[in-house]
Amino acid sequence: MKKYFAQLRPLERRLAVGIVVGLLLVLNYVFIWPHFSDWGKLQRRLDVARQKLALYRKAIAQSTHYAARVKKMESQGETVAPEDQAINFLRAIQSQSVQSGVAIVNNSRTMSSTNEFFIEQVQNIRVVANDQELVDFLYKLGAGASMVRVRDLELQPDPAHQHLDANIRLVASYQKKLPGATPSASNVKKP
């Protein structure tokens, strides 16, 4: 290589060195310079990961405190009905409608959706009643330990303008059985 370079005239040598330097600058511009900010990005990602780790460690350290608060809250309030109580959803609606004097004109099929902890059942019904009976029906459905609540309510007078015609979407939440969970000796009732 030196032999070929030595045979070149000074102007040709300068031109060859200029081309090599230009080629190196272009290669640096294309492949090296775009990665100058990578170190800063890596530092920011590392800082975010350290903050997240500190937050998780703090939450883990407080897990005994959270467990105590959960036990306290569970002992204070109503419990969510277990999954096997979901079959009583429509039966509870129908019995309450009879008690309140509300006529169920139409009901749809019960729809279910689930997440990690709860099963949510949705029932659409169409009822005809006067205002007092309807209020009594809706109030008693949500009273007590019932997990039934009204999600949507559409009211209009019936054609004779004597009663209210209501389309109601009722929702009930039931506790999902955790896989592998077996009743402990303290939870089993003895006859």
Image (tube, rainbow, N blue to C red):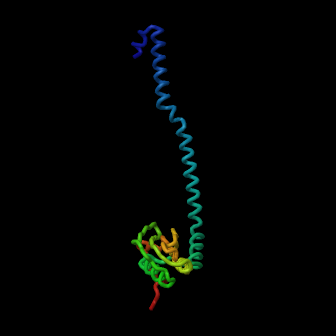
Q: Nearer the viewer, residue 72 or 151?
A: 151
Percent position (x, y) of residue 55? 58, 58
Q: Residue furthest top?
A: 9
Against 114, residue 128 (above or below) is below
Quadrant of the image containing the C terminus = bottom left
Q: Give the total number of marks visible in the rendering.
A: 0
In the rendered view, tell whether residue 42 sits above or below residue 181: above
Examine the rendered structure and indicate whether residue 87 appears above or below residue 42: below
The extreme front residue here reads 160
Q: In which quarter of the image is residue 62?
A: bottom right
Side of 55 where 15 appears, left or right:
left
For residue 20, above or below residue 35: above
Return the x and y of residue 66 as percentages of the image width and height.
Answer: 58, 69
Could you tell me which residue is drawn at 56 percent across and 80 percent down?
132
The reply to whether residue 85 is in sight is no
Specify the quadrant of the image occupied by residue 3.
top left
Image quadrant for the N terminus? Answer: top left
Q: 132 or 157, which is in the foreground?
A: 157
Foreground residue among 60 and 132 = 132
